[in-house]
Amino acid sequence: MDESLVVRAQRGDRDAFAVLATTSIDRLYRVAYRILRDIEPARDATQQALYEAWRDLPSLREASRWEAWTYRLVVNACYRESRHERRMTASIRLLPLDRSSIPDTALSVADRDELERGFRRLPAEQRAVVVLHHYLGLPLTEVAGILGIPAGTARSRLHVATRRLRAAIEADAVPATKERA
Amino acid sequence: MSTPHRFDDLLNDWLEEGPESAPREDLAAVLGGFPRIRQRSVFGPWRRPMPTFARLAVAAVLAIAVGALVLTQIIKPSGPPVGAESTPGWQDRFPTQTAPAFVRPFSYAIDPSSGIELSNGGQVTRYQFGIAGDPGPLVVVDHPAAGYRLEPCAPNGGAVNLTPTPEEFVAYMETVPGLKVTRLPPTTIDGRTALGIDVQQQSDPSCQEHYIFGTDEDWTCCWPDDPTWVRRMRVLDIDGSLIFVTTPYGAETEDRLELANAFVDTIQFERPGATPAASN
């Protein structure tokens, strides 16, 4: 990432920010989707994060923190989207995935199904820690820094989330029933 | 039964699945939309490090200016001149700041001499006001709160009451294990009654995880916090939404509480029908 672009954008250079947005949108969307597990809210969260990035860029003190800072913005946007999602869950049914397009890997259909269910039951704060740590591969101290929480809190959230997801996987012997999200 | 290693592999593989790219129209929307949003300015030269000689120079100029002001106040005759209007307060002399896009705005009259500024731009439903250089916020406004969890100590917090009244919320807080809640006399913010509570968090082995209410980040998980720290919450209803105006403070910072109270008095909530602002 070219830090001079960030500095220019902080001074109001729209062309510089356009480059930053173009090179950042996919990585932010990937994280948003994996936290929210839904395309439309992930799209909204990604766009909100980028708008906020432009609006608040002058407050970013270190240009080198652009990437981590935008992760924080998109995670916060995901929190908001997840609240909207929670309000709508009474009328949304969790549909089975169309697996015909997914290559058969070591991840079994049952595992995938249980992970999906278990993950959706986690609060957004725990999902975010799981995604930042397991998907982006960030150490927990860095995850904590991005989320603005103590490292112990990040560790606790990951521990609880992992325990619940493991429990979901290990319960796969129990016949699955379709239920509301 | 999955081993820890196998479980991590499963989780990593599962997370890898999913879209890799945002839809192209989203990029077009962002590129077309962001130029219409004003960037927030970072107020004041005090945010940047200054050389010592510059600080001394600024201090000297300020001292001279203050001295001159005091002299003029002493010398001038008492009472307003005949026909003069009353002297406006700083709320009238300085334009209010308006919370930015994405939410219905609040406006805040900020006295520049107090040093208070909107300190975190990264949040949308939360506004933090602090003094430059201070480690913690002075006042936090959460808008809107997303209700409270009916079983705060249970995994995931149980069901959610999305539309509690201020009284319901205060009564609920009094029942949460690990919280010491002290009711305060109601106050008024922008002409609306605000219920007041002081909340302290204490370790409670029966409630290791709290999922209390749905704001952006805090107070949803993983307590206990410092039991000596007090959060003074004012809880009010704005057009059907629960709003928290919170002042965190410790015993050594009563002066901060006084300043925070003065600031809270300047908060104005948008009236129904007002046009949302697109920028600050």
Image (cartoon, coloured by chain):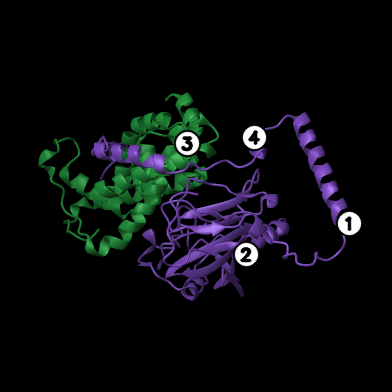
Chain colours: A green, B purple
The lab-note entry on whether marks 3 and 4 share a chain reads no
What type is the residue that disc 4 sits on? Arg
Residues at marks 3 and 4, CA–CA distance in whole angstroms: 26 Å
What type is the residue that disc 2 sits on? Asp
Residues at marks 1 and 4, CA–CA distance in whole angstroms: 35 Å
The lab-note entry on whether marks 1 and 2 share a chain reads yes
- What residue is at 69 percent from the left and 61 percent from the top? B88
Of B216 and A9, the residue lying toward us: A9
- Disc assigned to residue B48: 4
Circle 1 is placed at which residue position?
B74
Q: At which x and y percent is residue A8?
A: 48, 28
- What residue is at 40 percent from the left and 43 percent from the top? B36
Chain ID of residue with mark 3: A
Identity of the residue furthest to the front in this view:
B83
In this view, A84 is above or below A161: below
- What residue is at 59 percent from the left and 54 percent from the top? B95
Q: Pointer 4: residues within 10 angstroms few (<14), some, or many (20+)?
A: few
Q: Quadrant of the N terminus of chain B?
A: top left
Of A131 and A163, the residue lying toward us: A131
Say which of marks 1 and 4 sits in front.
Answer: 1
What type is the residue that disc 1 sits on? Ile
Circle 2 is placed at which residue position?
B265
- Label 3 SS: helix
Earlier in the chain: of badge 2 and badge 4, it is: 4
